[in-house]
Image: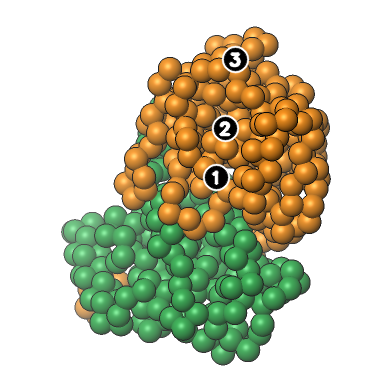
Chain colours: A green, B orange
Amino acid sequence: MGVGSASVSPTALPGRAAVAAQPYVRDEDFVAFYRREYSAVVGLAFVLSGSRSVAEDIAQDAFVAAYRQWTRIASYDDPGAWLRRVVANRSVSRFRRATSEAKALLRHGQDNAVQPEVSVEALALWAEVRRLPRRQAQAVALQHVDGRSVREVARILGCSENTVKTHVLRAKSTLAHRLREVSE
Amino acid sequence: MTALDELDRRLARAGSEITTTFASAPAGNARRVMRRAVRQRATMGASVAVAAVIAVGAVTLTIGGDGGERQVASRGSESSGPGTTTGGTTEVGTLDDLAALALRGGSWQLTDASERAGGGDSADAIPSRHVRYVDDAGGIVSLDLFAVPAGSFYETIVPVLTATDGFTMVSIRGVEGRVEADGNFISVAWRESSTTIASLSVHGATDQAEAVAIAESLARVDQSHWRTMMSEAPSADGPTPTTIED
C-alpha cells in the first residue's frame, strides 16, 4: 500500500485558516485534531471504500500514522490535508484489495458490514464514483464530501490544479454518461 | 437542466448525506490511537535490544519507546524451528470458525488490508490480512495477520515483541507476559517455514481477559487457512504478497 508516498511536505499543504494558526505539539492537540477530523475522514474513506468498517479502519490507521509523526505533522499548515492524502490513498488501495474479501464474504454468506444510514440513491452514486479511476474518484470525493476546493484537492493529491480539473471533468463526464444509461 | 447539472446536484446531495451521517458518528477513542502509535514506535525502536536477548536468553527485555520505558516479559526468542508448533493448538478450523466466533454475542467482519509491521511510512510494507470484530455494543477488536520475509528487519523484532514462547502458537495461552501496559494488546508470532514468520496481533479488546479469549480462540483456527488467506492477498498497489510455503 502506498502510504509511503503519502508524505506531504509542510510547504505543500494549504493553510486553512481555522487550522493553520494552531500549533500541534501536545497530546491534547492531537486529541482535538482527532475529534475535529475523524468524522470527515471516515466519511471520505467510506465513499472511497464502500464500507463503513473499512473506512473506520483506514481512518484509525491514518491517525496512528499521524500520531507517530506528530511533531512533524503538527508543524504543517494543515495536518488535516496530510491525513486526507493518507486516507484517500489507503481507501482506494484497500478498496481494490477488498475485492477478494467481498468474494469471501459472499462465499460465506455473511456480510456483517455495519453501513451508515445513507439513502440508496447516494450509495449508488458513490458506488459509481468508486468505479472511476482512483485519482478521479479521490478528487470527486474530496470536493463533494470534504468540501475541498480545486486548489486544496491539488495540494492533498500532490498534483496541479489543472490536473484536478481534468480529473473532475472526466469523472463527471463518465458519471453523467453512466447515470444517463441507467435512467434510459 | 443538463446531465452535468443534474450530476452536480446529485453529488452535492450525496456528499451532504455523507457529511451529515458521519458527523453524528462516534469518533472512537483518540487515546487508544495514541497508545497504538506508541506501541508501533516502541516496536521500531526495539531492534537493538533484541540482539541482546537472543544472545543471553534473557527472560525480561526492557524496551524504550516514545511512550516511556517499559518491560516486556520474554521467555527467550529462540526459534523453535521451521514449521514447528507445539501444544496441539492447530485444530482444524476454517474461516467459518473465525467468523462464527461469538465473543460478546457480536459478529465478525473480515476486511483486507496491507499493514506495516511497526507501522509508519517506510517503504518496505508487508502484506497482511485484517480481521475485524464488531460486537453488539459497537466495540471493535481488530486482528492483524501478516507474514514477514525472513531476514528482514521485522524478523528480528517481531519474535521478541510478539512471541510469548519462541514462535509457537501454543504460547498464546501463556499470554500474560505479552500483554502490554494498557491491557488490551496481545501479539504472537510463529515460524511458518525456514523463510517466513507469521504473526497475529490482537488489539482493541476491552480488557486483558477478552484479549486472551480472542487469542485462544484464534489458536483453534487452522493455520493452513491463514496461509491461504495471506497467499491470496492481492497487491494492486502494494508489494508482492509473501506466499508462505512449508
Considering the numbered disc 3 on the image, is that residue within a helix, a strand or a loop? loop
Q: Chain of mark 3?
A: B
Secondary structure of residue under mark 1: loop
Write down the chain letter for disc 1. B
Which of the 4 quarters of the picture holds residue A125? Answer: bottom left
A120 relative to A20, above or below: above
| Amino acid found under the numbered disc labelled 3 | Thr
Residue at numbered disc 2: B199
Residue B53 bears which disc, if any? none
Q: Could you say which is closer to the camera, residue B47 or residue A86?
A: B47
Q: Are marks 1 and 3 on the same chain?
A: yes
Residue A35 placed where, x, y %? 67, 68
Q: Is residue B202 left or right of residue A87?
A: right
Q: Specify the label residue B85 is tagged with.
A: 3
- Residue under the image location 60 percent in, 29 percent down: B189
A97 lies above or below B228: below
Q: Name the image quarter holding residue B132.
A: top right
Q: Residue at x 57, y 32 (%)?
A: B199
CA separation in Å, label 3 and label 2 = 13 Å
Q: Residues within 10 Å of mark 2 (few under 14, many from 20)?
A: many
- Where does residue A65 sit, x and y in percent of width and height? 57, 60
Up-down relation of residue B38 to residue B78 (above or below)? below
Name the amino acid type tagged 1.
Ala
Q: Secondary structure at mark 2?
A: strand
- Residue pointed to by mark 1: B117
Q: Are callouts 1 and 2 both on one chain?
A: yes
